[in-house]
Amino acid sequence: MALCPKSVLVTGANRGIGLEFVRQFLALKTPPKFIFACCRVPENVADLNSIAEKSPSVHVVKIDVTDDSIIGGARAYVESTVGADGLNLLINNAAVGVQKRLQEVTREEMRRHYEANAIGPLMVARAFLPLLKQAASLSPAAPMSCSRAAIINISSVLASISENSSGGGYAYRPSKAALNMLTTNLALELKEDGILATAVHPGWVKTEMGGPNALIDTGESITAMMSLLAKLQGEEGTGKFYNGVRGGLIV
Ligand code: NDP
């Protein structure tokens, strides 16, 4: 199966994994007509702006996932740009990740991680749902897929309860576990609309969050995830938590 959404929206697209998603969508054999590359401060994202200057399909759009009025403004822009085609693929990638030990974690850090990593992706999904439904409705006979209509939540193996053998990460781990539960809920509710919803772990990746000792670079991570996204289909592909690099499910 080829990955060929007409439109894709990526949050946190100004650096790290999000920026590489933009690059690799542009490099597809059939690239999307619209790539909405979202970031908090569009006037201050030189790498992304230089891609957008050369590629008219890339639209740099302001989204702070913790701010509903900014999310609403982004949705209005995307809606007016895609028109009746709707939005095919939403990638909730933006997140914060600071490893807090028990004695360091505060109420404020817990709230900050839940806001950005769980509540934010849910509110973005809710805001863009009418556009995803519109895209899904245009190919009613097709199975669910990332080319038809899908929400991909970038999670982390650190969210896995069964694989937690080291502890720590008091704010980050539970915020991503909450994201996984939200993903399951979305998958259950949206399958009747033909919208797939799945969570993916990108590997341990050299970015600001992953740090310099991480195992892989963004190119390797996103190449693997793009090939996974191309394969996700129907009931088999929705409501899951995949290891995007090694393959297989995480429990
Ligand atoms: P980075 O820290 O490099 O990038 C994080 C991105 O999220 C930045 O674009 C940042 O924007 C954005 N962001 C943070 N808060 C908000 C917000 N409130 N609203 C909008 N954007 C926001 O991280 P990675 O690229 O490594 O991570 C991408 C995803 O992959 C995350 O979901 C992360 O949890 C996940 N992941 C990463 C791993 C790794 O090893 N790197 C491992 C497992 C999962 P700004 O520049 O404005 O701060």
Image (spheres, rainbow, N blue to C red):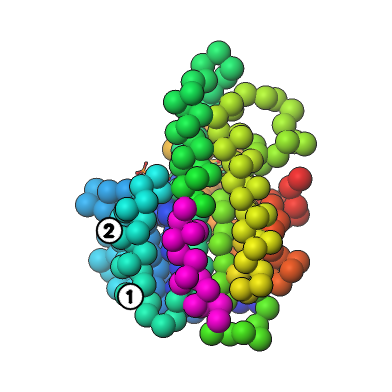
Q: Quadrant of the N terminus?
A: bottom right
Specify whether tag 2 is near ligand 1 (CB below 8 Å).
no
For discs 1 and 2, the disc positioned in front in the rendered view: 1
Seen in the picture, residue 48 relative to 148 is either above or below; the reply is above
Residue 30 locus on image (x, y percent): 49, 79
Do callouts 1 and 2 mark residues in contact (Cβ within 8 Å)?
A: no
In the picture, the disc for residue 49 is 2
Q: Is residue 39 visible?
A: no
In the picture, the disc for residue 81 is 1
C-alpha distance separating marks 1 and 2 = 19 Å
Left or right relative to 58: residue 158? right
Of label 1 and label 2, which has the lower sequence position?
2
Q: Quadrant of the C terminus?
A: top right
Identify the residue at horizontal 59%, vertical 26% (top origin): 170
Residue 63 locus on image (x, y percent): 35, 53
* Crowding near the residue tagged with mark 2, few <14, some 14–19, many ≥20 C-alpha atoms within 10 Å: some
Magenta span main SS: helix
Magenta-drawn stretch contains 82: no
Frontmost residue, 250 versus 208: 250
In the picture, the disc for residue 134 is none
Identify the residue at horizontal 44%, vertical 26% (top origin): 108
